Amino acid sequence: MIGFDVLILAAVLGVGGSLLLAKSNLQPSFMKEITQTFMGSNPYQVRNLTTQRIEAIAGACWLCGSLPLMALGTILTSETNQQIQTSTYLSHIFALVGLGAIGLGGSLKITDRISRRIYLPKMIELQREIFEISTDYLKYRGVREHELPHQQNLSQSDRNERLAQTTEWLNQIGTLIDVPRHASEADDSYLARLGPFFDK
């Protein structure tokens, strides 16, 4: 029976590894944003590639673990000729598949945490410039600090356009560093919550 259990576990690892690899390649984190054009590198693509890499490594580990277990299970099964009831086989299958599902869910959470530890510093550096511009726009109502001596040259419509752009930038920053905006949250409040990430 041990050989049969090892074979089922090998199959679970093989399927789980395939699912992790499929997710890393077929389910990008930001389907729409990774095709957009940005000045410099696309931050969504940078974050997505980091997550894909970690998920692919986890999937490969699952698949590599399934191969020796499959070989071991085959050997153990061939050495035993026990007559085991079908109900026993089924109970073992369901138990090991359930264990595999829990392991797969745990692996996804672990890959998310590892990915975030890698991509968060990158996202902060990539978004630092627009965060600083957004800070000026909100502090001086659509004007950069160095523009203050000549702020009368900026029309109110230009300032409003900049403030609207600031809202979009803050949403982008929050998405990339996993700090979503609260419902109806004002830009000033949102900026204050994002600030500690850029003070480090």
Image (cartoon, rainbow, N blue to C red):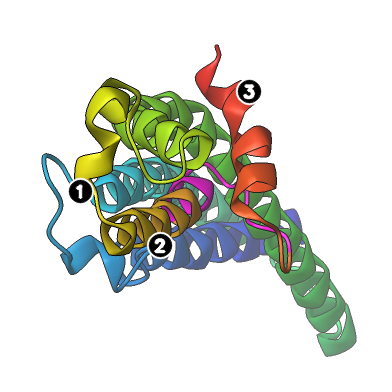
Between 169 and 63, the one lying in front of the other is: 169
Of discs 3 and 2, which sits in the foreground?
2
The residue carrying mark 2 is: 164
Front tag of 1 and 2:
2
Sequence-first tag of 1 and 2: 1
Q: Which residue is mark 1?
A: 42
**Which residue is located at x 49 percent, y 56 percent?**
171
Q: Earlier in the sequence, mark 3 or mark 2?
A: 2
Marker disc for residue 196: 3
Q: Nearer the viewer, mark 1 or mark 3?
A: 3
Closer to us: 114 or 35? 35
Q: Amino acid at mark 3?
A: Pro
Q: Is residue 193 visible?
A: yes
Disc 2 crowd rating (10 Å Cα; few below 14, some 14-19, many 20+) is: few
- Determine contact: label 3, label 2, CB under 8 Å: no
Numbered disc 1: secondary structure: loop
Give the amino acid at mark 1.
Asn
